[in-house]
Image: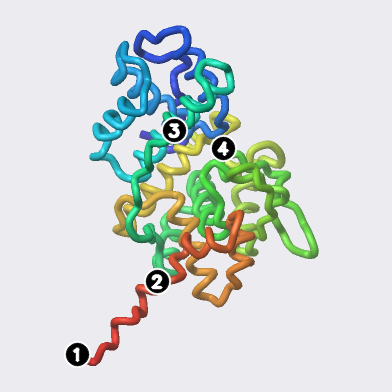
Amino acid sequence: MTTSLVPIKLPPEESQFALTEAQTILRRMVLDSVQSIHSKRNYAKALDDLFVFCASRPLSRALLMEYRTTIDHLSASTINVRLSAIRKLVGEAQRNGMIGLEEAANLTDVPNARQKGTRLGNWLTREQAKELLAVPDRSTLKGKRDYVIIALLVGCALRRRELASLMIDDIQLREGRWVIIDLRGKGGRIRTVAVPIWVKQGIEAWTAAAKIDKGRLLLPLSKSGKIVGDELGDWAIWSVVGQSSKQIGIEHFGAHDLRRTCAKLCRKSGGDLEQIKFLLGHSSIQTTERYLGSDQEIEIAVNDNLGL
């Protein structure tokens, strides 16, 4: 399988199951209310599963609590995404006069799954990051592109979708240095991201070899190394990172782990927490602290020197 054209699987416009007219309308309203393709897909899955479970039974809190027990085997985050979709469904029903305010409040009173502890996620050491950057064969066009993918993820902490939609003109000079200007991230938050010199050099090598000076920065390539489209899917980015990380002996490593790696390396290099927050596009310092696992140091842990 090539990494150039990996399609994003969109949620079906209609459910695969027979729905009532009201269910069909509400399902469409919920999916239209979220922008992310991945959220649309997850919400569609959650609502279709709920409709199948309910069958012809009217929706009630008791029924939702019963449904809640059928998904206990899933991770806490997956359970909470499904419950979020259901709350959106109930909210749309209430706003459109299908149910009353009191009934809506009762239906949304299904507790989330509690996440115990703080998930630190996965990241690379500085040496591992250098190894990963050395994987792409930069004598080839594909290698130059793949190097840029990895470099922008680990050097600029971009999200996969942000990287896939990045335009060449988004990279501009500001105050004597190269930046990604007005990057629209999660939640519609706008930020400007500094581009390290080594990342910019990789970008210049790729654009010169690909002979592109406008449009999307990253483009799909055929097996023979020829440009075959004008937009690289974010799943292709995921594939490049996954295949490259396997070559340095790391399994189950994704693009978001490189974003976390960038944040971790910034912090270990003495980076200010607030500046890391700006880099990541977080809404608060607390979010960045949780993201970094700032309260827990595992490389030099407090219990390493117990003297026992």
Label 3: how many residues lie within 10 Å, few (<14), some (14-19) or many (20+)? Answer: some
Going from N to C along the chain, the mark reached first, 1 or 3, is: 3
Image check: 67 left or right of 224?
Answer: left
Residue indicated by mark 1: 308
Three-letter code, disc 1: Leu
Q: Quadrant of the C terminus?
A: bottom left
- In what element is the residue under mark 3? loop
Report the residue that reaches farthest toward the bottom: 307
Going from N to C along the chain, the mark reached first, 1 or 2, is: 2
Going from N to C along the chain, the mark reached first, 3 or 2, is: 3
| Percent coordinates x, y for residue 40 in the rendering | 48, 29
Q: CA distance from mark 4 to mark 1?
A: 56 Å
Label 4: how many residues lie within 10 Å, few (<14), some (14-19) or many (20+)? Answer: many
Residue occupying image coordinates x 58% and y 57%: 280
Residue occupying image coordinates x 36% and y 52%: 253
Q: Nearer the viewer, mark 2 or mark 4?
A: 2
Three-letter code, disc 4: Leu
Three-letter code, disc 3: Thr
Label 2: how many residues lie within 10 Å, few (<14), some (14-19) or many (20+)? Answer: some
Q: CA distance from mark 1 to mark 2?
A: 21 Å
Residue indicated by mark 3: 108
Q: Nearer the viewer, mark 3 or mark 2?
A: 3
Is label 1 in contact with label 2 (beta carbons under 8 Å)? no
Q: CA distance from mark 1 to mark 3?
A: 51 Å
Residue indicated by mark 4: 219
The foreground one among 50 and 102 is: 102
Label 1: how many residues lie within 10 Å, few (<14), some (14-19) or many (20+)? Answer: few
Going from N to C along the chain, the mark reached first, 4 or 1, is: 4
Going from N to C along the chain, the mark reached first, 2 or 4, is: 4
